[in-house]
Amino acid sequence: MDYSVYPKLRAIYSFLPTSEDIESLLRAEGVSDFRNRFEKTPFLKRFPLLDNDLEGYLKMIPFSLARIVRKQIPGASAFFFDAYIKGYELRDIKDIINGGEGFFIDELRDRSFDMESLDDYMQKGLWEECWNLAFSKYKERSNKIDIEVALDQCYYSYFLKEIRNLPYEEINGTEEFLLILINFKNRLWLYRLKQFYNLQDFEIKRFLIPKGEVYENFAMDEGISEDVFIREFGSICYWDFKFRMYSMRSILAFFFFLSLKINKILSIYRGKLLSLDRERFKEIWGELYVGS
C-alpha cells in the first residue's frame, strides 16, 4: 500500500537529534546548559517548545504525532495503527499501578486513581478480562508485577491479531517486525528475572509474552540489558524505516525509533537534574547510541 504519510515522516526524521547532538547534551554542565544546547538543535524548529515543561513536552511528541498520522492512514490499516496507539494507554495504566499518574489518555490524566478506582476504569474493552484475572491475584498477593505481566501479554496478543486489518501483502512483514519487538521485550524480562530476581527456568516462563522464538527457547537465552535493547532494536528500526519504504512496517519502525531517541534525551535530562556528570551517567545508563 502506498502510504502518503511516509515522505512526511522522512522529513520529520531529518530534524531528529543526531549522535553529535546527543553527545553535546551529555557534555552539558547542568540543566541550564542542557536546555541551551537542546534549544539549538533542529528538533525544536520542527517541534517548538510551548512551555517550560521539557519532560512533558518530550513525552507527548510521539503520541501527538501518532494521532495525526492515524488520520492519514487509509482504509482498515488505520484500525491496525489504533493498536499501536493503544500502547500509550498501557503506559498510563502501568504508571498508575506504580503510584504515578496518567499522562496520555484524558480519562486517566484528569483523575486521581488508586487500585480500586483503576479497577472501575478497567471494566471495559480490551483490558477487562486480563485485568480481572490479574487483579484477583493482586488482591491475594499484593504483587503488582502480576498485573503488569498480564497487561503486557494481553496487549501484544491484541497487537498481533490486529494485523488482520492490513492488506495481504503487508501482513507477513509487519508480523515479523512485531515478533522482533516481542523477542526483545522477552529478552529484557529474561535479563531482569535472571540477574536481579535469580528465578529458575520453570518460574520464568509465566512472565514472558507467549509469542516468538525467545519464548519458545527462553532457557537458552540470558537476556539483554536496557542499553543493548536500545542499541540493537534501534538499529533495526532505523534500517526498516529507511529501506522498507511506504509500508506499515516502516511507519511502526519510525515511531519506535522516535521513542528511543526521545527516551535517550529524557534520560540525559533526568541525569542533569540529578547533577550526574557524563561518565557517571554512562556508568548508570550505559551507552545510548543508535544509528542517526
Image: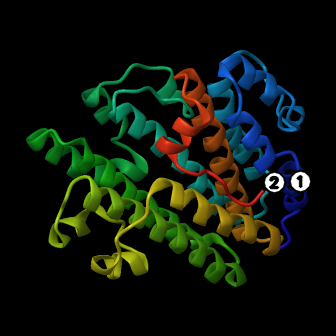
Q: Mark 1 is on which residue type?
A: Lys
| Nearer to us in this view, 42 or 116 | 42
| Disc 1 secondary structure class | helix
Position of 206 relative to 270 (above/below)? below
The residue where tag 2 is placed is 72
Instruction: Judge left or right: residue 51 versus residue 117.
Output: right
Cβ–Cβ below 8 Å for labels 2 and 1? yes
| Residue found at x 59% / y 55% | 84
| Nearer to us in this view, 158 or 253 | 253
Furthest-front residue in view?
Answer: 279
| Residue found at x 68% / y 83% | 168
Q: Horizontal and vertical percent for residue 113?
A: 35, 24
Q: Residues within 10 Å of mark 1 (few under 14, many from 20)?
A: few
Instruction: Judge left or right: residue 28 versus residue 120.
Output: right
Q: Residues within 10 Å of mark 2 (few under 14, many from 20)?
A: some
Any part of residue 160 in sight? yes
Instruction: Judge left or right: residue 138 versus residue 192.
Output: left
* Occupied quadrant, residue 215: bottom left
The residue where tag 1 is placed is 8
Q: Horizontal and vertical percent for residue 235?
A: 67, 66
| Residue found at x 68% / y 58% | 290
Q: Mark 2 is on which residue type?
A: Gln
Q: Nearer the viewer, mark 2 or mark 1?
A: 1
Q: Horizontal and vertical percent for residue 175?
A: 57, 76
- Real-space Cα distance between discs 2 and 1? 11 Å
| Nearer to us in this view, 200 or 154 | 200
- Give the quadrant of the N terminus: bottom right
